[in-house]
Amino acid sequence: MGVMLAIPGFGTAEARNHGAGLDLYLVLLFVISEALGLLTLGLVQPWGEAVPRWIPLLGGRRIRPLAAVVPAALGALASTGVVYYFFLSILFGGFPAGHTTPEEVILTVCYLPLLAWGPLLGSVTYAYYRRRTSSQGQHTPTPSP
């Protein structure tokens, strides 16, 4: 965000004098990441089990568990791979040229929580799968008096 807003101290002078294309990329990256984060909430909220009624043609229908589990599991694997690759490349190769030490510290602190995102998404996905599949087709008989 510091690069997009051209805040002094974030990136090189060339990075701060960027064009509209980089701004559009950063805004789209922000919107997509927020949308995926919101979809993650669907794994733990009741609205993640049925399509909201206000959506035409599909509203009110139950969501099949694998329709949510497969993309979420792939997202957890991809997120884990990308983030760990990023941090390992910085750990063993260092930051790209042009960053000052305070910038490197700020970037590291800001992105450090991402290390937990993939594993946590994987565990939430597993919990969603267990919750949705354990109750389907299994009816407990009521005891007779």
Image: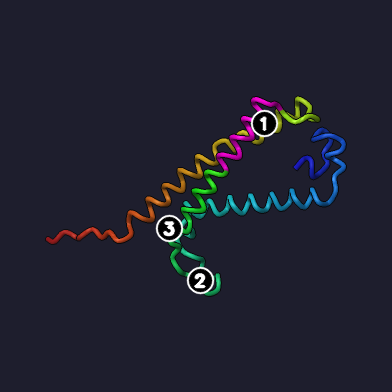
**How far across and down, in percent of the image, does residue 7 sit?**
82, 39
Q: CA distance from mark 3 to mark 2?
A: 16 Å
Q: Which residue is mark 2?
A: 58
Q: Which circle marks residue 65 in the picture?
A: 3
Question: Which residue is at a point 79% across and 27% down the rendered structure image?
Answer: 100
Of circles 3 and 1, the one toward us is: 3
In the image, 89: left or right of 141? right
Give me the disc on residue 33.
none
Which class describes the residues within 10 Å of circle 1: few (<14), some (14-19), or many (20+)? few
Pick whichever, 62 or 92, lies toward us.
92
Report the magenta stretch's main SS: helix
Secondary structure beneath disc 3? Answer: helix
In this picture, which residue range is highlighted in magenta?
79-94
The amino acid pointed to by label 1 is Thr
Q: Is residue 84 magenta?
A: yes
Q: Amino acid at mark 3?
A: Pro
Q: Position of residue 23 (x, y in %)?
A: 79, 49
**Which residue type carries mark 2?**
Leu
From the image, tell me which residue sits under label 1: 108
Residue name at image x 79 percent, y 35 percent: 10
Tags 1 and 2 in contact by the CB under 8 Å rule?
no
